Amino acid sequence: MATDRPQRDKPLMEDVARLAGVSRGTVSNVLNNPAIVSPDTRERVLRAIEELGFVRNQVALALASGRTRTIGYVGTDLANSYFLDIARGIEERADESGYRVVLANSDVDAAKQRGYLELFDESRFAGVIVAPLEATHDEVGHRHRAGFPIVRVNLADPRGEGCAVVVDEEHSGYLAARHLLDLGRRRLVFAGGFPSLSAVRSRLHGAERAAAEVAGAGFAAIGATGLRVPAGLALGRELAALAPHERPDGVVAVSDAFAAGLIQSLLSAGIRVPDEVAVVGHDDNTFATEHVLPISTVSQPGVEMGRVAADLLLEELAGDGHAHRTVVLESRLIVRSSSVADDSGVHGTPFPEPAGA
Amino acid sequence: MATDRPQRDKPLMEDVARLAGVSRGTVSNVLNNPAIVSPDTRERVLRAIEELGFVRNQVALALASGRTRTIGYVGTDLANSYFLDIARGIEERADESGYRVVLANSDVDAAKQRGYLELFDESRFAGVIVAPLEATHDEVGHRHRAGFPIVRVNLADPRGEGCAVVVDEEHSGYLAARHLLDLGRRRLVFAGGFPSLSAVRSRLHGAERAAAEVAGAGFAAIGATGLRVPAGLALGRELAALAPHERPDGVVAVSDAFAAGLIQSLLSAGIRVPDEVAVVGHDDNTFATEHVLPISTVSQPGVEMGRVAADLLLEELAGDGHAHRTVVLESRLIVRSSSVADDSGVHGTPFPEPAGA
DNA sequence: TGCGCTTCTTGGAGCGCTCCAATCCCTGGC
DNA sequence: GCCAGGGATTGGAGCGCTCCAAGAAGCGCA
């Protein structure tokens, strides 16, 4: 246990005031309401601040004014670019309104998530945006009801309370499958993921619905478990072992990582993608764009989700007539070479070069 | 601009005290020094806290006690798993000492990094761990000299002030090249990255040093620019176009992402990896483990770096005889299939399956 | 010269807690 | 029965700021 170190001695507003030859109140005005201070006084005060290296104590400010301009974001798994995109969207909007954003990574751990919510609440942050876990709905709801402004992203409250921004996952699955069907594929499979995850179930249902709309379309859910590359690699080997006419000609993969693994093992086995098997992933993360064969995908609108969530929170903070609501964002199909062969030839060679380094 | 909403009315310590029939001081003691409160009083107070849903105001606590148990971490690019690993290491240690950690993503933007440092300083966080940018050394040094406890990670202060934890990048490059040389490779190249980055230069020098140690070893730095997949893909195409005897038989790639792209395009061109060209990356991130052909790499000890940084900071906060210092961590070579063919055959098929989903 | 304005500036009260000296109360020993 | 001693509790001062009512200063005009 670390000893509690006394606060190092920083210059106070008092010191600035003395040096500038004005009162504390005037220094405060320079900082919070510069317009009402005469230009030369302002100038003198700013010089004193500079000279002393005065750093205004937010803690005292927050206590005195009962206000904080910091928003907390608790992501589920910041290693996933989707959750980091959400953070970017939040930062963008917060910035425009003069708020700051700090992040916390709950790392898919309910206890850690609770701890961060507690910290942000105790620290009297203006509000918080959280990507809840199934296990933390109660905690989140509890704090929300106690008056702490909270907006959920990615997962809405089961009871529909408060604000939330979610993606229509069923629609995502539908888009992916529909795309393959429109390309003339008729032997579809949905692959990857755990049925325990509601997002996975929704995507599956959406894909199923799309298949049901098209006469003569076959559809199956493959019992692959796993969301990531290795699971995709494994499925690819299984598919490669099948006779060509038994193989699906279109695969809706639960994630881009899964799709990346799948495509890699299909290609390695000499199966042409997309000619023989077309693949669509989900999420539009780095796996999709930086793959040998850029992957068609249904993009999770992470940045947009962050923006909308921040807007909802800021509206609530502004106070005038905010009504809680859930915003459903639609994902977007992004067609790349894993479903439609590009002009440059088969097998993804030569590779289109994304912009940048 | 959002209107400043007044603090919602939360129960105060005063309210808890009244309900429990004790004084403010006793409630404070229950929270901060439970041992000196008699068991039944303590019980009564805790019940009152529970009943009212009292959430202790950290802001007032921080102001009154002049202490904060929050540490800030400003990462350069949290999308890079290395920086997130550092965060994990910090959290682990902070947790053990009763500190909380909040994150900020400077997104390789000096202005954002400055903003977060300012926020953490103004908020009187106990201290901060920062992965500085070349452009923010002054800012960091300035705040450090003003008495704000700061530990740098990944990049030390040019003037050697304060605490820092860094990786011996030169050694990393050396390890990678040495490994290839030990495998008998004699036509080495170092590829990728921007020479403006000191880490890249160091890795290159290390590789060069290793080559110089071995008689008959050829070495060249390829002027590829870029750290990520597309740059690697591009280089792969160039190498594939060369006559076999002109091609390097060993490549030290600046990053795993670069190596992933490189390997993918070599394999697509029918060049065998590692038989014809062995590749070693850097960083040990997801690109390395989740690739078709798991990539040999020099691992950045991210978690360890976070741990050490947190230890240094906590030591400084504890106050008793802390001496600033820079800790140099050594990276570790991880041999996978991109440099040494595994038993299961050439061309990375079938693929070894990492554990987990 | 004096009055009424406007524009700036001032300094006290208070934010919700911690800290600590002072007080209270209970127990046990003589 | 009385007092010393120690544990438990109390409440005032103060953390560094904001906010605001009130005062000071400057100005134009009759």
Image (cartoon, coloured by chain):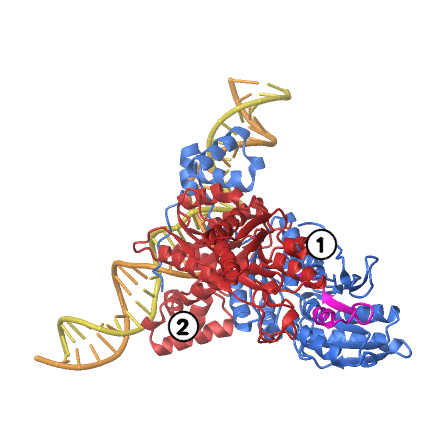
Chain colours: A red, B blue, C yellow, D orange
Q: What amino acid is at disc 1? A: Ala
Q: Are marks 2 and 1 on the same chain?
A: yes
Q: Is B284 colored magenta in this rendering?
A: yes
**Residue B99 % position (x, y):** 60, 51
In front: B151, or B269?
B269
Residue B46: x and y in percent read 49, 35
Residue beneath label 2, please?
A21
Q: CA distance from mark 2 to mark 1?
A: 85 Å
Q: Please state which of residues A207 and B315 is positioned toward the viewer in this rendering.
A: A207
- Residue A78's place in the image compared with B224, above or below, is above
Residue A139 % position (x, y): 48, 42
Which quarter of the rendering shows the N terminus of chain B? bottom left
Q: Could you tell me if residue B158 is visible in this image?
A: no
Which residues fall within the magenta stretch?
A: B263-287
Q: Total number of numbered labels?
A: 2
Q: Nearer the viewer, mark 2 or mark 1?
A: 1
Examine the rendering and report whether any part of residue A90 can be seen. Answer: yes
* Amino acid bearing label 2: Gly
Could you say which is closer to the camera, residue B348 or residue C10?
B348
* Residue A91 pos. (x, y %): 47, 63
Q: What secondary structure is marked by label 2? A: loop
Q: Dot 1, how many residues are within 10 Å of its Cα: few (below 14), some (14-19), or many (20+)?
A: few
Give the class, few, some or many, for how many residues have Cα within 10 Å of label 2's Cα (few <14, many ≥20). Answer: some
Sequence-wise, which precedes: disc 2 or disc 1? 2
Which mark is drawn over residue A241?
1
